[in-house]
Amino acid sequence: MFPAAIVHPKSGYACPLYIAALLIFGVPVSYFGKMGLRDIVKNFDKSKVLVVGDLILDRYIWGKVSRISPEAPVPVVEVIADDFKLGGAANVANNIIALGGRVTVAGVAGRDRAGQVLRQLLEDKGVVCEIFEDSRPTTVKTRVIAHNQQVVRFDKEEKKGISGSLLKRLNSFLGHAVHEHEAVIVSDYKKGVVYRSLIREMLKHAKQKRKLLAVDPKVGHFHFYKGAGLITPNVMEASQGSGVEIKDERTLIKAGRTLLRQLACGAVLITRGEEGMSLFEKERITHIPTVARHVFDVTGAGDTVIAAFALAYAAGATLQEAAIVANHAAGIVVGEVGTAVVAPEKLIRSLKVARKA
């Protein structure tokens, strides 16, 4: 029995062309639109995406270990370098810029040094910022890495919801900002910015203008996302969000369909690590195999997936094409240590290699 993705949509029978297309790209050739995948990537610079959500500053302390502490059974890290990178919604925006797109990011940061660093990093990348300052500290995740392995991570954050007045200001900005962009991404890290009312307000504006609203979800907030155009949970999030433990293909399909039905979403894209991705739509399910050759670090991979998907869709891709592009982008970033981004040249090269394989 062939999976749904390689069965001819009209005849119901599997055919060699469809099987070949699955082996190369993960979906049947007839599912592609008029544009080629490389043409879609080349159109990224014409697309503008709005990113809303939890802004995070990632700090990396790089070092080496040669001894164990005499004070406790822990390694002593000799620090060699210390740098900052963009995380959370800020990293989604960073991915869009790196891919050649245009982006506006909206969120909240503290009136502190970390907030200044975060804003400066975004502006240096060419990101248009609408950052509202608050008394809360800027969320900072610090990772200590030695010999390309993470030794420990410690977080500085405040998770309580933002104030009503701040939420009102953010909603006011989003009311007109949604209309000025081809797609909207909500990056929810459950740090207090994403409210149900915020999603509801953005959905109202997105649907009026037929814009894609895509959500990178967080467990505990799934009921916020009802009516979204797309959600992109990983396997653990999909399991907990649907109430279906994903153990095999049967339970994967049950979980995906459950989310699709309960949340009334346009599509659900479940990222499955080394097993690729599965795209659930009302009429079909498309399984896309991974293209990653080596996996060193999955930090920020979810940010890359939703950034590449939304940008590709805004550039004219179908849902299936956007998922393939996102799959290739994710395959590139997991092969690098730390929060990484993808250049359009690398993405085009990956698509070329897949086509020739």
Image (tube, rainbow, N blue to C red):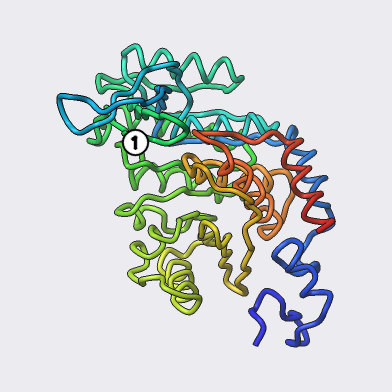
Quarter placement of the N terminus: bottom right
Image position of 237 with respect to 40: above or below? below
Which x, y percent locates residue 197? 35, 45
- Residue 136 visible within the image: yes
Which x, y percent locates residue 83? 45, 18
The amino acid pointed to by label 1 is Val
In front of the other: 148 or 333: 148
Which x, y percent locates residue 179? 59, 37
Q: Residue at image x 47%, y 33%? A: 148
Task: Judge the density around disc 1: few (<14), some (14-19), many (≥20) Cα neighbours within 10 Å.
Answer: many
Which quarter of the figure has residue 229? bottom right
Image label count: 1
Q: Residue at image x 38%, y 59%? A: 236
In front of the other: 286 or 60: 60
List the residue tagged with mark 1. Answer: 193
Which x, y percent locates residue 14? 76, 84
Identify the secondary structure beneath mark 1.
loop
Horizontal arrangement in the rendering, residue 116 relative to residue 100 (left or right)? left
- Residue 211 visible within the image: no
Image position of 212 with respect to 72: above or below? below
In front of the other: 219 or 153: 153
Horizontal arrangement in the rendering, residue 150 relative to residue 214 (left or right)? left
Image position of 212 with respect to 95: above or below? below
Quarter placement of the C terminus: bottom right
- Which residue appears farthest toward the left when viewing the image? 71
Image position of 231 with respect to 140: above or below? below
Q: Residue at image x 31%, y 14%? A: 111
Q: Residue at image x 54%, y 58%? A: 274
